[in-house]
Amino acid sequence: MALQTYQDVVNYLQKQHRRKHLLLGNGFSIAYDKKIFSYNALSLFIQKTDNKILKKLFRIINTYNFEQIMNQLDVFQRLANDFLEDNNLAGKITNASDALKSSLIDAVSTLHPEQIYEIQKEKSRSCAELLGEYLGGDGHVFTANYDLLLYWVLMANISNLGNVVDGFGRELIEQDEYKPDQEPEYGDLEWGQNKDAQHIHYLHGALHIFDTGVAIEKEIYDGNYILDNIKKRISKKEYPVFVTAGDGNQKLEHILHNQYLDFCYKTLCEITGSLITVGFRFGDQDHHIINAINKAAKQSISNRLRSVYIGVFSIADSKHVESIRPLFKCKVNTFDARTVNIWNRFTDEEDR
């Protein structure tokens, strides 16, 4: 039996007058450029690190999957803290963990289009059309990616999209003395004042979102390349809100301890209608996302998530979905992910 297409799914939900939402995974970014955004590309970059501890760790664990390594580091650190009197070892493990996070951030920022205008207009418009299916109505867009692709597409096409609200805004700074000709002053771009209208959610954080300890701030394009601004903040030991390490429970613990991530996650827990996923595999590290979907499905009958549509690229993907289907508390459907025209791919030579 042939898989239904993405447009089949959209048409059906429209006929049912069903509210729909979008969840993007790493496949969304890989579809733009697999040489840049695949985990292998990140791993090859990190392999070149000068950090001796990380090199030794890669050799011992025999993997360059940073999530697995971060998980192992967490286990090693707990063992060192509980069973060993050697505080130096625990310190080395902590330093290795920090170094890996820093290397990952450096990798993502280096293996990245330098600025918004490097994304071809046709690809950007095509992606915006996909997003418009959800933002043009009352849907939400969730992403587990931490790169800048989604942010840049939204910036480039904001006038053609609907609810492009990520929750960030500027507070007007009160003047000590009123002057009629004085330009109003605004504070930093902080998250919170527009959260009630928020429709864009970075579930695992992103390169342009920073936690200052006092507020959640967004780095924006201000005449300089945004990656340059991000790197400057990193050089000052300011790091983006960024969830990569551990299994689903560890990721959820990180999420719940950050007010921005917690809000995005709880929003996912409360969606209604149907959820369409593109490029999201639901792997072993994603059980917290399945739990959020199940919470949404357990809401009142008239106000709950009824179904999830998972895009699959291959027979192996379809088999994987069958293996995890019992984990979901709502109806699970699949569709051919190759029929989603994310980056104007149907005009690419290799797809003709």
Image (cartoon, grey):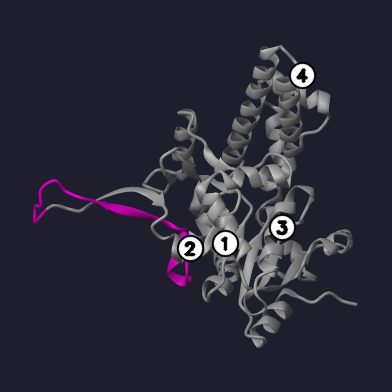
Separation (CA) of disc 1 from disc 3: 13 Å
**Is disc 1 surrounded by few (<14), some (14 to 19) or many (20+) residues within 10 Å?**
some
Residue 262 picture location, percent across and down: 56, 51
The amino acid marked with disc number 1 is: Thr
Question: Which residue type does callout 2 highlight?
Answer: Gln
Q: Is residue 352 among what the camera can see?
A: no
Q: Which residue is mark 3?
A: 291
Residue 185 relative to residue 201: left or right: left
Residue at x 33% of width, y 53% of height = 170
Task: Give amino acid for label 3.
Answer: Asn
Crowd class of label 2 (few under 14; some 14 to 19; many from 20; radius 10 Å): many
- Magenta-highlighted residues: 155-181
Q: Amino acid at mark 4?
A: Phe
**Whole-percent x and y of residue 221?**
41, 49
Whether residue 118 is visible to the viewer of this picture, yes or no, is yes
Callout 1 secondary element: helix
Kindly identify which residue carries mark 1.
267
For mark 2, give the secondary structure: loop
Residue 198 image label: 2
Residue 350, quarter of the rendered image: bottom right
The mark nearer the N terminus, 1 or 4, is 4
In terms of depth relative to the viewer, which is nearer, 195 or 319?
A: 195
Foreground tag (4 vs 3): 4
SS under mark 3: helix
**Front of the two marks 4 and 2:** 4
Whether residue 285 is situated above or below residue 328 in the rendered picture: above
The x and y percentages for residue 14 are 64, 84
Q: Is residue 189 magenta?
A: no
Circle 4 is placed at which residue position?
Answer: 83
* CA distance for labels 1 and 4: 40 Å
Quarter of the image for the C terminus: give it: bottom right
